[in-house]
Amino acid sequence: MMLDEAHALEAKSWLIDANGHREFPLQNLPLGVFSTSGSEPRGGIAIGDHVLDVSRIAGALTGDARTAAEAMSRGELNELLAMGTAARRALRRAVFALLVDASKEATVRPALIPANQCTLHNPARVGDYTDFYTGIYHAENVGKQFRPDAPLLPNYKYVPIGYHGRSSSIEVSGATVYRPHAQIKGPNDAAPSYRASQRLDFELEMGVWIGGENRRGEPISIGNAQNYIAGLCLLNDWSARDVQVWEYQPLGPFLAKNFLTTISPWIVTAEALAPYRIVQPARPANDPAPLPYLLDEQDQREGAFDITLEVHLQTQRMRESGIAPQRISQSKMQYMYWTIAQLVAHHTCNGCNLQSGDLLGTGTISGPDASSYGSLLEISQGGRAPLQLPTGEERSFLLAGDQLSLAAYAEAPGRARIGFGPCVGIVDD
């Protein structure tokens, strides 16, 4: 987890709006794909209130940085992600150098586009998507609603639980949330019927972008897993709880989850996140130690991230009344029971081959109390304790016109604050 000049708090740019930016200062430089009116999508870097059209500065770069910049001329970043850590780090340092050197302004300025003139797209082609279940507080809270005496299933503390999701419905922030229809059987129904979900929910997660690939039959070791983690984004795993409760046994989530997954548009790279790595919280004394293939001393020392996660809700009535979105939850990424490296190692321990551009979800990251719950299922206690809003409205689950927004930022002493960009959806019935 190498620190370099591109992490320095004191660094300043000739691009004034980059200095001290709350999400995209010099120390971040996340990767994404954008387009402008009449143009094809291509790779960009968020910097301040602008997007840097990377392909337009490729000629000012050399070596690995130039090769990486040229790969960003495509409408998806899979080729860049496949190049691995060295190429990403070279590009990051080279772009940083251009942005702090006033003599380079004439070269770079024409490649800077105001962010409000850009349309953002999925940063990579997602070949496969796997969603995990690493938030132990969420697992306990949900389990208590269905199994009060044994909320966690016996395998939870041994196995990073996950399921294969649907990659075709992964969309970038702003995608409409269409209320799903499916078979539903209420507790008092004699038989199921096909109807619209009335228990539409969000899930507060982080997404993990994979860079590089392993051959089928060759597991990625826990000690090598960091080399496959290209970066992180926000992820909202929209969920239809009434559909889920009817269909999930015995094979797990299906129609309750596959109608939409919203992600934030920027890949905040593993290199940018290096200063915000922290010790993985110790397990309770009575918990089993991870099996050897999931245990690495360095990963335990720096495999967690000090990232704050927030959820904001704004109903249609709140927007019409000029009332700002209300924060309904604030959690921490360090509440994950498993590290990201453990997810990668477990995913491949049977020989499964990951590919560049694959996306992993962490699962809902809830905290230890009601102010940090990562879903309405938890916040409203399954609908028994509706959320109270400033308009006098109540919410147990999401209704038409509701806007649900996730946000995240990383902070550390002596380091800049960096953010992840928007992860927003509005419900449309």
Image (cartoon, rainbow, N blue to C red):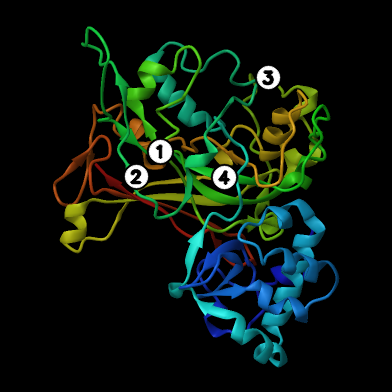
- Where residue 362 sits, quadrant-wise, is top right
Contact? badges 1 and 2 (CB < 8 Å): yes
Q: Which callout, 3 or 2, points to the residue nearer the camera?
A: 2
* Helix, strand or loop under label 3: loop
Q: Position of residue 335 (x, y in %)?
A: 55, 38
Using a 10 Å C-alpha cutoff, classify the residue at mark 4 as few (fewer than 14 neighbours), some (14 to 19) or many (20 or more).
Answer: many
Q: Work out whether mark 1 precedes mark 4 in sequence or the reverse, and give the earlier one.
A: 4
Mark 3 to mark 2 CA distance (whole Å): 40 Å
Question: Mark 3 is on which residue type?
Answer: Pro
Q: Work out whether mark 3 precedes mark 2 in sequence or the reverse, and give the earlier one.
A: 2
Question: Mark 2 is on which residue type?
Answer: Val
Mark 1 to mark 3 CA distance (whole Å): 32 Å
Using a 10 Å C-alpha cutoff, classify the residue at mark 2 as few (fewer than 14 neighbours), some (14 to 19) or many (20 or more).
Answer: many
Q: Which callout, 1 or 2, points to the residue nearer the camera?
A: 2
The residue located at (29%, 45%) in the rendering is: 427
Q: Which residue is mark 3?
A: 288
Q: Which callout, 2 or 4, points to the residue nearer the camera?
A: 2
Q: Work out whether mark 1 precedes mark 2 in sequence or the reverse, and give the earlier one.
A: 2
Contact? badges 3 and 2 (CB < 8 Å): no
The residue located at (48%, 30%) in the rendering is: 137
Q: Work out whether mark 2 precedes mark 4 in sequence or the reverse, and give the earlier one.
A: 2
Question: Mark 4 is on which residue type?
Answer: Gly
**350 or 67: which is nearer to us?**
67
> Where the C terminus falls, by quadrant?
top left
Using a 10 Å C-alpha cutoff, classify the residue at mark 1 as few (fewer than 14 neighbours), some (14 to 19) or many (20 or more).
Answer: many
The residue located at (61%, 86%) in the rendering is: 109
Mark 1 to mark 2 CA distance (whole Å): 8 Å
Query: Which of the labelled discs sits on residue 207, or is there none?
Result: 4
Q: Which residue is mark 1?
A: 238
* Helix, strand or loop under label 1: loop
Q: Which callout, 1 or 3, points to the residue nearer the camera?
A: 1
